Amino acid sequence: MEGYAQLQRRLMLVTLVISLCAALVAYLRFDLLVARSLLVGSCAGLLYLRLLARSVARLGGGSRQVGRFQIVVPVLLVVAAAKLPQLELLPAFLGFLLYKPALILQTVIDG
């Protein structure tokens, strides 16, 4: 279980670093609105990753299925981006997906 907790911490840290770098590039290349939307999306991605990790950790404790609460996070992100003028939908959604490069990078490093 300690190895799993360590993997979780590494994934969160790598996702955070990738998100900050992407937001900086978005700010320099586009504008503050795009960078802010990307950061909000990446925060939602981090929350999603954390909820998913917690759900997977419970699998060993008698639970037989992964929880479905984490699906609420991307739905709320899309609704918020559609309703709030301070967020743009596409950068927010791309920010949400920034946890995936961290997963791929971790797979390549561990593999």
Image: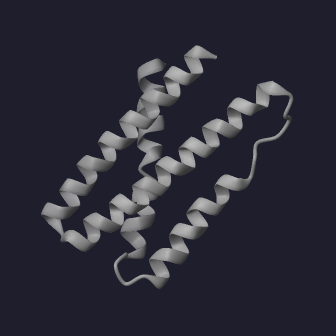
Residue 83 falls left or right of residue 69: left
Q: How is the image coloured?
A: one colour
Q: Position of residue 10 (x, y in %)?
A: 43, 28
Q: Position of residue 64 (x, y in %)?
A: 86, 35
Residue furthest to the top: 2
Task: Report the number of discs.
Answer: 0
| Residue drawn 45% across the image and 45% down it | 99
Residue 51 falls left or right of residue 110: right
| Viewer-side residue, 88 vs 50 | 50
Residue furthest to the left: 28
| Residue drawn 49% across the image and 75% down it | 80
| Residue drawn 69% across the image and 35% down it | 56
Q: Position of residue 4 (x, y in %)?
A: 58, 22
* Quarter of the image where one finds residue 31: bottom left
Residue 22 falls left or right of residue 68: left
Height in image: 110 above or below 20? above
Height in image: 60 above or below 79? above
Quarter holding the N terminus? Answer: top right
| Residue drawn 45% across the image and 76% down it | 81
* Quarter of the image where one finds residue 40: bottom left
Height in image: 24 above or below 108? below
| Viewer-side residue, 94 vs 38 | 38
Q: Position of residue 100 (x, y in %)?
A: 47, 45
Height in image: 20 above or below 44? above
